[in-house]
Image (cartoon, grey):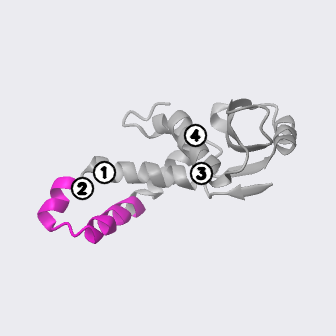
Amino acid sequence: METRGLLDPETAAAAREQYETLGPAAQTVTKEVAKSMDFDREEYRERVTTDVVGTARDALFASLLEVTLGTREEYEAWLDDHPDLDAHEEGNENVDRVAWHPVPFEGVVAAVTYQQEPDAAVGTLQRQAFGRHYRTLFSDNGEG
């Protein structure tokens, strides 16, 4: 098995805290990208909105989610060790490899199957996990 990523929040509060800490990094990344695109001050103020920085923070958080990669057998053994989590798996059950990310505060483990493209599987799973299990935590009303 292989693990990639850094963020593996156990609780909704921990996820919110980790998300909040990425705000300054998202702002810096956005500013540096705009600088490399030769935005002048006026264009920067016009185009780099709060929504743009928020999108950068969403992408940073998603791309840092911890994902485990393993064989179907390793995944099934992991599931056996975590009977309190419901598996939400995308892909074909006959594929040999699985990437997964547990979301304990929702009682689920998000998973995708893959055959030969682990990088694509990790990116897909991170985006799906963010969209399905984290995005609502970070909305303005904080519900989720």
Name the element at disc 3.
loop
Going by the numbered disc 3, the residue's amino acid type is: Leu
Does residue 133 appear left or right of residue 59 in this picture?
right
What amino acid is labelled 4 in the image? Ala
Q: CA distance from mark 3 to mark 1?
A: 20 Å
Three-letter code, disc 2: Val
Is residue 138 highlighted in magenta?
Answer: no
Residue at screen point 22% across, 70% down = 38
User: In the displayed image of the protein, which residue is found farthest to the front?
Assistant: 116
Q: Secondary structure at mark 4?
A: helix
Which residue, given by chain and number where applicable, does mark 4 sit on?
129
- Return the residue at label 1: 52
CB contact under 8 Å: marks 1 and 2: yes
Q: Earlier in the sequence, mark 2 or mark 4?
A: 2
Q: Which residue is mark 2?
A: 48
What residue is shown with label 3?
65
* Label 4: how many Cα within 10 Å (few below 14, some 14–19, many 20+): many
Front-most of 132 and 15? Answer: 132
Q: What is the span of residues highlighted in magenta in the rendered image?
A: 25-47
Q: Give the amino acid type for the residue marked by disc 1 in the picture.
A: Val
